[in-house]
Image: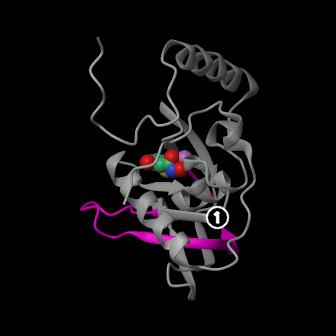
Amino acid sequence: MAQLTILHYPDPRLRIKAKPVREVDERIRSLVADMLETMYEESGIGLAATQVNVHERVLVLDISEDRDQPLCFINPKILHSEGEVSYEEGCLSVPDIFETVSRAEFIRVAALNEKGEHFEMDAEGLLAICIQHEMDHLEGKLFVDYLSTLKRSRLKTKFRKKAKRAPVSRDAGRSRISAPVI
Ligand code: GNR
Ligand code: NI
């Protein structure tokens, strides 16, 4: 297993639309394992492959308190959505920003699991919100896209400055152990 590097807004690679997975093979299972490790390490409740610069339709989630109920959705499709709910969302690709987003309250999703088996699931509450948030990532969409133009342009300026101050190497985040600074 390996911890993967998470891309940060406004990285243009977060805008790439992910392609369907053709076959759920060992390569995909290894990606799922690495994504789960990365999600747990970063204390997220979900992670989309787009965020780790893999542009295939794979997402993982765990909204459980004890962080012991991993879920994996490959080629997810929303079959039905209903109602509306607002929630203060955050994103590992937009660190330390929390903004209210409105989404469907109830959804029915079809996907493949890590064994390549088809399943369907009804979701509501935080699980439904998180699935929609992750599926947006696969479309190259971020929660900040739902904010006003003014709010988003302020965020962009802030994150561009942050990226300049602390340029992240391609390998950053893979290891907690870094070389000593001389
Ligand atoms: O960890 C996360 N928390 C969260 C909170 C509210 C709504 C959505 C999320 S998903 C986020 C992890 C992440 O960025 N997934 O793409
Ligand atoms: Ni996110």
Q: Quadrant of residue 128?
A: bottom right
Residue at 30 percent of width and 26 percent of height: 179
How many numbered discs, if any?
1
Q: Secondary structure at mark 1?
A: loop
Q: Nearer the viewer, residue 135 or 182?
A: 182
Q: Nearer the viewer, residue 50 or 102?
A: 50
Location of the C terminus by quadrant is top left
Task: Establish if 95 lies above or below 104.
Answer: above
Task: Establish if 99 lies above or below 41.
Answer: above
User: Can you see residue 4?
Assistant: yes
Q: Position of residue 100 (x, y in %)?
A: 56, 39
Residue at 58 percent of width and 84 percent of height: 120
Q: Nearer the viewer, residue 76 or 117?
A: 117
Task: Establish if 57 lies above or below 180.
Answer: below
Residue type beneath disc 1 = Gly
Q: Position of residue 155 (x, y in %)?
A: 62, 22
Q: Position of residue 76 (x, y in %)?
A: 64, 72
Q: Position of residue 164 (x, y in %)?
A: 57, 14
What is the magenta range? Answer: 61-86
Q: Is ligand 1 within 8 Å of the beta carbon of the residue shown at mark 1?
A: no
Q: Residues within 10 Å of mark 1 (few under 14, many from 20)?
A: few
Can residue 84 be found in the magenta stretch?
A: yes
Can residue 74 be found in the magenta stretch?
A: yes
Residue tagged 1: 83
Residue at 39 percent of width and 50 percent of height: 3
User: Can you see residue 87?
Assistant: no
Location of the N terminus by quadrant is bottom left
Residue at 47 percent of width and 37 percent of height: 171
Task: Establish if 63 lies above or below 151.
Answer: below
